[in-house]
Image (cartoon, grey):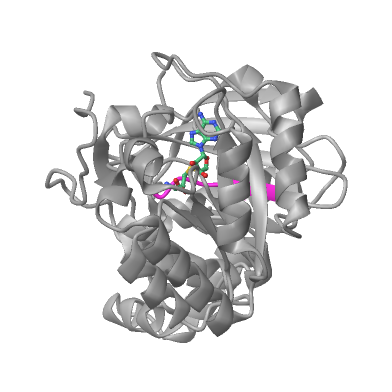
Amino acid sequence: MSQPPGQLTFVGPRRARPARHLADLSMADRRAAVTELGEKAFRADQLSRHYFERLTTDVGAMTDLPAAAREKLATLLPDLLTPVKEQTTDRGTTRKTLWRLFDGALVESVLMRYPDRVTMCVSSQAGCGMNCPFCATGQAGLTRNMSTAEIVEQVVAGARALAAGEVPGGPGRVSNVVFMGMGEPLANYKQVIGAVRRLVEPAPDGLGISARGVTVSTVGLVPAIGKLADEGLPVTLALSLHAPDDELRDTLVPINTRWKVAEVLDAAWAYAARTKRRVSIEYALIKDINDQEWRADLLGKLIKNKLVHVNLIPLNPTPGSKWTASRPEDERAFVRRLEFHGVPVTVRDTRGREIDGACGQLAAAE
Ligand code: SAH
């Protein structure tokens, strides 16, 4: 399936929903669910500790639960993700997993271990409806939204692998989560917010990851950015800008035909003001398309003196795209122009290209 250029899809085809999972529910709702099953409410806390602290779903091994209750409680821990394929690079410290969901939909997540942190890059939708022509996920169209628990399970799986010492570097923990896998997180707003809450709530409610370590990346759904600012969740907002002018951005990020550069930047500044968090501007450098010095200059003028950081991403190749990464000298000139305007800028140390696991390369093919 591929999308005609410029077409935007906000709602996927109607599909059956994945089974209800503990991670879909707030603690209050978990207690209610456990009571409905005929068990004491505090069993929800016990079950939650097993899942979010010990990272286990094997009710048979939960010896603090009465044997008779285990089977009933197991219905709150259905298997949502089935691993299909695992690929590693960087001596095992970058690891991409392809998952099959209950209905056959495929998604991918990527674990990246650095000396000082571990970042999980997760998917929020199977496919994506935002149709950015340089992104492999965008080319396949939207299959469906993922549920809160399907999103959380990707992080739990990474946490489990780290705790078990399966990732070189010794036992570890997930410190950062970036919604930069497949999908447009703000087009699946409710489920993504639920997932963010599960990630940041301390155990037994959730995984207890610092909100500062969570990044939600968006093409720029302006009303949803406003809503996110009001959630009281100080997560980092990443805005995939890729062009400072509407003429080019209309073609690179088709959502720009709805909300223009000026509007999306205003939403980003409002987000920064509200949360006191630095907004990250994502800019994939595409040779001779968006990497001219005058565009760097225009970008610099638009964002100087704001609570902002620019992340330049050398374009990763995707099938069927004629575009490539900028020449090194053009990249350097782009950085210099932004620095001239006093804008903090880094070039992303992009990982996983060898396994099609880098930004924009997730296509979830078997
Ligand atoms: N839909 C969201 C999140 C997923 S993409 C968003 O677009 O922000 C994560 C980042 O990778 C985005 O900044 C996206 O624009 C960028 N990206 C997509 N394709 C890419 C490619 N081929 N090379 C480099 N970065 C890419």
Residue 233 counted in the magenta span: no
Q: Does any portion of residue 182 appear in the rendered image? A: yes
Q: Which residues are magenta?
A: 118-124
| Residue at (28, 55) in percent of width and height | 19
Q: Does any portion of residue 210 appear in the rendered image? A: no
Out of 150 and 28, give the one closest to the viewer: 150
Left or right relative to 171: residue 104: left
In the rendered image, which quarter is residue 335 located in?
top right
Q: Is residue 195 above or below residue 87?
A: below
In the rendered image, which quarter is residue 287 located in?
top right
| Residue at (65, 64) in percent of width and height | 304
Q: Is residue 251 above or below residue 245?
A: above
Out of 269 and 176, give the one closest to the viewer: 269
| Residue at (33, 51) in percent of width and height | 146
| Residue at (49, 68) in percent of width and height | 268
Name the residue at the left extreme: 14
Out of 319 and 259, give the one closest to the viewer: 259
Quarter containing the N terminus: top left
Residue 224, image x and y in percent?
34, 68
Residue 41, image x and y in percent?
42, 86
In the rendered image, which quarter is residue 307 located in?
bottom right
Say how many tags the image has: 0
Left or right relative to 327: residue 125: left
Quarter containing the C terminus: top left
Out of 329 and 137, give the one closest to the viewer: 329
Residue 34, image x and y in percent?
36, 77
Left or right relative to 310: residue 262: left
